[in-house]
């Protein structure tokens, strides 16, 4: 802004980056989101560098117009860390991978909720980074978080039913305005929530997990999370509510809202794949023996009938090729069988619970096993 030579690309190489990014922005939107293209094009045309962008955009049209959406999406996933223009739509979505877990966060795309949500996400990412070199025995998983502002006194997270991964609702007070003089309270609130979320995907016993957490605090975690002022205060200083609302982001639909974006994981923040530090091979072998010993007698008649069906044998081979172990298949059949008995209100003889004549719905059992996969 204050340079005497603003057109000197050697002195200001960032100008070339801005021109390239603006050009790419137009080419992408022209290919996959015409509704968003027009307002963005008008904004870029008003920039003083439009004369440099225009010829590059015109030359690139031929190449990008021939690309399929799937090809563009592959490029997004390879080159970007998130969905382009991910901050538009009625609901905001952010996802990233850290410590072997995919974190998916969503919230209502208004100013106040965005202030709180982005502050929490920034806090959570720093918190997780501090454990990158600590083996918490985390399960590779998906953690879904829904952030809401409601009438409560202090933040609270509530675990929700989920068939895959963990699902939480994280509630914050509507007026979550903690003064700068009381940043310790803000830090304490957020650390409590992050600790609960992380413990839920850790296989460590509670006392060992808390030992690791305490050690992290002693190494200066609090000094790295909030420095000077809160994220919310800094955000609101640069982006006022008036500026935020002027973009009218809720009027537009996210790019390819139904298409999955596969996020990458930074090499330094990847999942620790070492053996459990308190692992006992002898104990595990005893547990595995128990699974075979206890599951097979309960389904031996069921299994005999299933093996007569070619459809089941085909599915069995498929599951084995995909890495299913014998005990996993036996346990799945056992669970399906119990559900079948309960659903059909079949009386179970304690001495001989699964009689051959009661296996009268083999096809249904096979379909259920396929669904369980």
Image: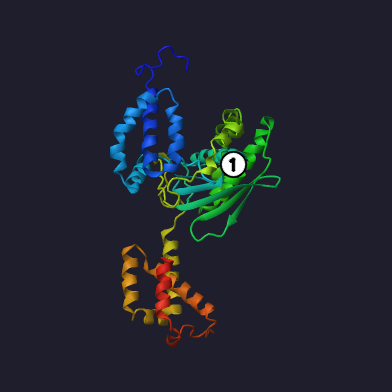
Residue placed under numbered mark 1 in the picture:
110
Q: Is residue 50 depicted above or below 145 in this figure? A: above
Residue at the (34%, 45%) spot, across then down: 74
Q: Residue at x 43, y 78 (%)?
A: 299
Is residue 297 depicted above or below 136 in this figure?
below
Question: As drawn, is 259 to the left or to the right of 218?
Answer: left
Q: Position of residue 316 (x, y in %)?
A: 34, 71
Name the image quarter holding residue 325. bottom left
Where's residue 88, x and y in %?
A: 50, 42
Name the side, left or right, on which 42 lies relative to 172.
Answer: left
Q: Nearer the viewer, residue 300 or 305?
A: 305
Identified at 35% across, 28% down, the residue is 54
Q: Residues within 10 Å of mark 1 (few under 14, many from 20)?
A: some
Position of residue 95 measured from the top left corner of the image (x, y, whole percent): 47, 45
**299 or 256, which is in the foreground?**
256
Residue drawn at the location 41% of the way across and 71% of the way down:
369
- Count all numbered tags in the image, as a single digit: 1
């Amino acid at each position: 802004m204050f340079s005497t030579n603003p057109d000197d690309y050697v002195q200001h190489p960032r100008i070339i980056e801005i021109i390239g990014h603006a050009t790419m922005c137009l080419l992408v939107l022209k290919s996959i989101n015409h509704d968003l293209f027009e307002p963005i094009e008008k904004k870029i045309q008003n920039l003083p560098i439009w004369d440099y962008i225009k010829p590059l955009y015109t030359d690139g049209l031929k190449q990008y117009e021939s690309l399929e959406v799937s090809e563009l999406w592959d490029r997004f996933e390879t080159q970007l860390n998130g969905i382009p223009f991910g901050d538009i739509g009625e609901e905001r979505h952010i996802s990233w991978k850290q410590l072997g877990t995919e974190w998916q966060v969503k919230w209502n795309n208004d100013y106040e909720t965005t202030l709180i949500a982005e502050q929490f996400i920034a806090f959570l990412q720093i918190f997780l980074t501090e454990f990158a070199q600590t083996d918490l025995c985390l399960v590779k998983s998906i953690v879904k978080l829904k952030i809401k502002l409601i009438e409560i006194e202090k933040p609270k997270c509530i675990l929700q039913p989920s068939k895959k991964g963990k699902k939480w609702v994280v509630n914050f007070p509507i007026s979550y305005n903690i003064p700068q003089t009381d940043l310790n309270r803000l830090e304490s609130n957020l650390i409590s929530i992050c600790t609960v979320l992380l413990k839920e995907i850790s296989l460590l016993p509670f006392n060992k997990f808390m030992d690791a957490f305490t050690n992290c605090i002693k190494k200066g975690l609090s000094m790295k999370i909030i420095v000077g002022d809160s994220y919310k205060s800094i955000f609101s200083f640069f982006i006022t509510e008036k500026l935020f609302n002027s973009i009218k982001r809720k009027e537009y639909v996210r790019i390819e809202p139904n298409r999955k974006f596969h996020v990458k994981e930074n090499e330094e923040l990847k999942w620790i794949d070492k053996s459990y530090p308190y692992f006992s091979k002898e104990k595990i072998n005893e547990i595995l023996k128990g699974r075979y010993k206890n599951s097979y007698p309960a389904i031996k008649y069921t299994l005999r009938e299933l093996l007569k069906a070619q459809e089941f044998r085909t599915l069995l081979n498929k599951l084995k090729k995909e890495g299913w172990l014998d005990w996993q298949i036996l346990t799945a059949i056992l669970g399906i069988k119990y559900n079948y008995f309960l659903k059909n209100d079949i009386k179970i003889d304690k001495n001989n619970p699964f009689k051959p004549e009661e296996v009268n719905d083999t096809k249904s059992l096979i379909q259920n096993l396929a669904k369980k996969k």
